[in-house]
Image (tube, rainbow, N blue to C red):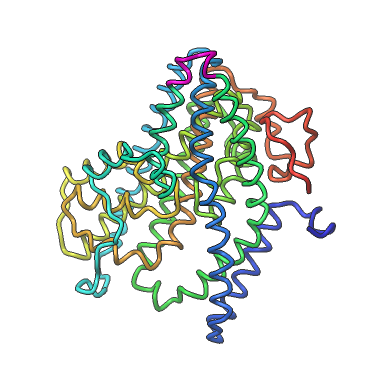
Amino acid sequence: MPAALRKVPFSVQILLGLVLGVALGFLARANDLSWLTSTLDTVGGLFVQLLKLAVPPLVFTAIVVSVVSLRGVANAARLALKTLLWFGITALVAVSVGIGLGLLTNPGRGVTLDVAGAAAPKKTGSWTDFLTGIVPTNPVGAFVEGNVLQIVFLALVVGAAALLVGEKAEPFVALNRSLLEIVQKALWWVIRLAPIGTLGLIGNAIASYGWDLLAPLAKFTTAVYVGCAIVLLVVYPVVLLAAGRLNPVRFYAGAWPAIELAFVSRSSVGTMPVTQRAVERLGVPREYASFAVPFGATTKMDGCAAIYPALAAIFVAQVFGIHLGVTDYLLIAFVSVVGSAATAGLTGAIVMLTLTLSTLGLPLAGAGLLLAIDPILDMIRTATNVAGQALVPTVVAAREGTLDRTAYDAAGRRDLIDPAQEPAATRQDGLTPVPA
């Protein structure tokens, strides 16, 4: 990396990549430069592929280590239950925002689309598939296929077993800790490429999705972004103030690098190391953060599993002329709170959407109408997911009296993505500094 660029804060590098990507995207679309569009697509695709490459080992080792780490946490069971409770509470509020916004804006009313040409996505979800899909038929297959939900199941079982075995399992736990450090180190290198990945992802989106494609879905797209903005800028600050007596500005200052990376990468799991570092910088004890963040990265999805499917279900029902009653809206809320693990922290929310549609008895082909703009929607959805994943452990730690409020108030004063700015001896997250 050039010496001059090393001095530029990472968030500014991301912003520069975003601006340049938008400019190149408009240039490619205005002049019909297919080679430029293809190049941008390749650059962005490679960045996402590199993130996905790290997902299976990262999820498995992080969860195994986090479950075993609960041994050193006082009242671990109570903390786990409170974390789940706040996951559920915030998910319920988020899906309520989605439903309310859908009823207010009617995103599918008056939309003219070729419904006959819509086809159900190849990858769909149902309660049966969800429940049976948790347990892998082949442990190796779960890693080869990148099935995050099955990897989470395996990691939870193995971690719990190692916790109960105790000292005899320590060599295995130590191996997982070492593997986690290695994977995180490699993933930090990938994260360093985020400005270039941002350029490719945003540039390709601009070049590929013109107003002619977005126009029929403009109201729906706007509703999704507004819904996520309400949760980010209203719901979460209220939770921080009311439940944790915390300054929301400080929270967002500390969590912003993770939210920013989530927006451009569209992967909660890929952002997980940054999220955990942000949560620890906010003053959450490392032992608790190492459990709550990996768990949240695979199950806490307020954007993908609450706001989006609620609005999308209303959109599909209105496009197909199907009336939804009170029972249907209650079902949407139930699916969002209980079934959010189906999204499993990867890019896209198609599985969760088709799970919601099938539960309501709506045409699965309706999901096909939204596939074209899914990358545009997924950016704000994932940013909302990650903000919620950082929020819950911060609030729980504050309510338990274990939050370091001095660290919380100081959060955001350093460039979180640049570990070289912090000496190894003073690091709180246990990660080895990455050379600039």
Residue 212, compared with residue 85, is above or below; it is below
Residue at left 59%, top 40%?
Answer: 273
Instruction: Return the x and y of residue 179 as percentages of the image width and height.
Output: 60, 35
The stretch of residues the image draws in magenta is 161-169
Say whether residue 398 is left or right of residue 130: right
Instruction: Return the x and y of residue 260 as percentages of the image width and height.
Output: 59, 51
Residue that lies at the very extreme toward the bottom in this rendered image: 31
Question: From the image, which quarter does the N terminus lie in?
Answer: bottom right
Residue at left 62%, top 32%?
Answer: 178
Residue 162, compared with residue 240, is above or below; it is above
Q: Say which quarter of the image contains residue 316.
A: bottom left
264 magenta-colored: no
Residue at left 27%, top 70%?
Answer: 111
Front residue of 201 and 135 = 135
Residue 175, compared with residue 197, is above or below; it is above
Front residue of 31 and 53 = 53
Q: Say which quarter of the image contains residue 290.
A: top right
Residue that lies at the very extreme toward the right in this rendered image: 3
Residue at left 35%, top 40%?
Answer: 138
Instruction: Return the x and y of residue 225 as percentages of the image width and height.
Output: 44, 56
Viewer can see residue 108: yes
